Structures are given as C-alpha cells and as structure tokens.
Amino acid sequence: MARRLRWTGLLPRDMAALIYLGPSFELVDIGTESVAEVLDSAAAGDSADNLQETSAAAELRRAIARAGAACGASEEALRSRLLRLLGIWQRSRRHAALLEDVAANAGNLARRPAPLLFSDRVGSNMADVSWEPLGGVAPEAAFYEIELYRHRSVPSRASRQGHEEGLERLGTFCAPGGPGARNFCLQRLEPLRWYRARVRAVGAGRSWVSSWSREVSFKTLSTKEARAAGLHVSADNFLVKSERRIHSAAIEEQSPESSEDLLPTPEEVERMRLEHVLDLLGDTTNVSNYKGVKNMLDARYCKGGWQDFVKMGSRFGRPASQREERLDRMKLVLAAEELYGHDYPKQNAWSMGPFYYEELGMHNLESAAKL
C-alpha cells in the first residue's frame, strides 16, 4: 500500500496537502483534503514510525506553501498550481526521497561524525567558511556539501504558524576540491542580513553521508564597512577592461596609498587618471557600487549607443520616476567620453553596448579593412 502524508498549515481554506509516496519514498502525487476530514479519519499507511522527513521534504513544504499563498481562495487555481508543481518536481527531482529511516541513518551517521565548521571572514556580500573533518572521515569522503539558510526579514505565513522557524533555505553547494576541500566562499549575500551555514561529508556515489555540523550564524557587514575592511567582492570578473575603468571613474572608492618612489608606477598613473575624471564629474558622482555594476551590465543590451542607454527604452517620454536613474547613467556616459573620446560611446561596434571596447580587436579589424 502506497504511503501517504498529510501536511497541515500550508494551504488556505483549512485544507491539508496529501503527499503520495512511491516505494523509495519519492513523490508520486499531490492532493488536498479538508482539515475536518483529517481529524475524523485515521487511515492506515499514514504512520511514519522510525521515519523522518528529509531536506527534500522541507523544500517541497515550502513550494506547497508558496503555491497556496499565490492562489488565494480559488480551489481551481490551487489544483492547477499543485499539478504544475508536481510536474516540475518530477522532472527535476524525480528520485528525491521525502522520508528516511531514522534507525539505519543513525547507525550510519554514528560511524561518521560531523565536521567542525568555522566562520572565518564575513563581508557585505560574501562569507568564508572552513571546516575540519573529525573521526577519520577525511580519507573516505568524496566531497563536502555546504547548506545555507537566511533569516527572513518578514516572517512568512508558514513561519508564523511555527514552521521553519523563520528561515529560508538558499541552497546546497558542493565545495570545489573534492576530498581535499577545507573552505568555501559563500557569495551573492545581502548586506546586513543574518545567515546560517552547516556542512557535511559525502561518500563516493552518495553511498553515505555524515551528520550535519553544528550551524554557524553570521551577519553580513554594510557595504561601507566591508569596503573599508577589504572584504567586498567586486564585479571585475563580469566586466571587461573598458567597463571596469568607466565603473571605477564614476564611483568614488577608497584609494590605496601611493608608493614612496619618485616616479609613479603604471597602476598609480591609471589611478590618477581615474581620479581626474572623478574630479571633473564633481559632486554629481554619487552612483552606488551596486547600481553602477547593474547599469554597466544593462548597457550591453543597448544597441543604439549611449542615447538608448540613457533613455532607458523610452522613445519619446521621460518619466519623472526615472530621473535619478537617467542621471546615474549619464554620469557613466560622461566618464566614458573622458576616457575614450566622444566616438566610442555613440557606437555599438561589438554588439555589447556603448561601454564595451576592444582596442586591440578594433585595430585588427581596421587593419584588415585597409588590405
């Protein structure tokens, strides 16, 4: 007989979610039932002795709660969303078990203790964590998994009812380096937010897993504090040289100390030129680092040069609500003209927007055209 789970508190209109499981405790179907019927019935097959829900079950709970919150009071919309969720789940996580044997798993985990996790460095959008395997697990481990949670700024409906304790699961990451990995950098975090992380060792082919380590809590710094401490992850890996120069010229950042040599180094010459552009822009330069990077990436979609970039897709009108955004984009255009002249920003030579310059490639193209 197929096992069936009843989850209450996730759906509106006093409805309970019915989860039908296969032989390996994988998801087979999703249904609904009124809470009154749940209280009046005690069907066989709902017992979960010696079984506990897995992390996949917690993820499915969150997905069902989101589907229920989005459909409102419409039962037809609820059924439609649950069917769509079932299809997505079976395509992406068909074999994910929602239950596991407590006794068998406890015996397995008792032989493989959890690693010891540490929080090393925390910035505004990154955090470095490290761990040390215990109990001789290191020679048997194939890789390590890091799971990250974030505290909700506004408690969700499920958390207000006592579920999930106000935490949002952000995902599980595999640390590069295989069995020799001892640290991992969590990126794309938000400033001034609380997070929790934990780690576990995984055997070859997932034949075994250790227990999760104790959770490490940390709070990210503000952007200003992280930049002052040198713990801010930049967007240099996403931008080409010309975009990095324009971005640096339009955003005021902390300048490093100059060397004691009489002649400036090439790095100092470049920095002085960018500072000169910054001085020319004057007090109007107050573009934030986040908005500056976003605008640089958005510029790659503008095929008509800097005019299309500043107009933000508008052909005729200039909405007053976008005035500050247009000013921020115009500052990037002014910085580009000071660094590269007036011709480059008007063009889209590489089909990557007005700030994407490839000087060596352009030279080669012009030389080939002359032949």
Image (cartoon, rainbow, N blue to C red):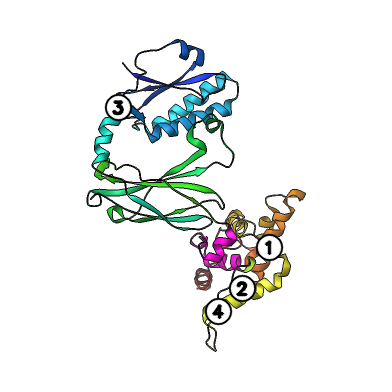
Identify the residue under disc 4.
268
Task: Give yes or no for contact between labels 2 and 3 (Cβ–Cβ under 8 Å).
Answer: no
Per the image, is 352 magenta?
no
Q: Which mark is residue 286?
A: 1
User: Three-letter amino acid code at disc 4?
Assistant: Glu
Horizontal side of residue 319 vs 247, given as left or right? right
Horizontal side of residue 363 vs 131, given as left or right? right
- Of residue 324 and residue 226, the one placed in the foreground of this image is 226
Task: Give yes or no for contact between labels 4 and 2 (Cβ–Cβ under 8 Å).
Answer: no
Distance between mark 2 and mark 3 Cα atoms = 62 Å
Sooner in the amino-acid sequence: mark 3 or mark 1: 3
Sooner in the amino-acid sequence: mark 1 or mark 2: 2
- In the image, residue 72 sits, relative to residue 337, either above or below, namely above
Identify the residue under disc 2.
274
Query: Which residue appears farthest toward the bottom when viewing the image?
Result: 262
Q: Residue at x 68, y 52 (%)?
A: 312
Identify the residue under disc 3.
24
- Residue at disc 3, secondary structure: loop
Q: Residue at x 54, y 89 (%)?
A: 262
Distance between mark 4 and mark 1 Cα atoms = 23 Å
Distance between mark 3 and mark 1 Cα atoms = 57 Å
Task: Give yes or no for contact between labels 4 and 1 (Cβ–Cβ under 8 Å).
Answer: no
Magenta span: 222-248
User: Three-letter amino acid code at disc 1?
Assistant: Asn
Sooner in the amino-acid sequence: mark 4 or mark 2: 4
User: Three-letter amino acid code at disc 3?
Assistant: Ser
Q: Quadrant of residue 336?
A: bottom right
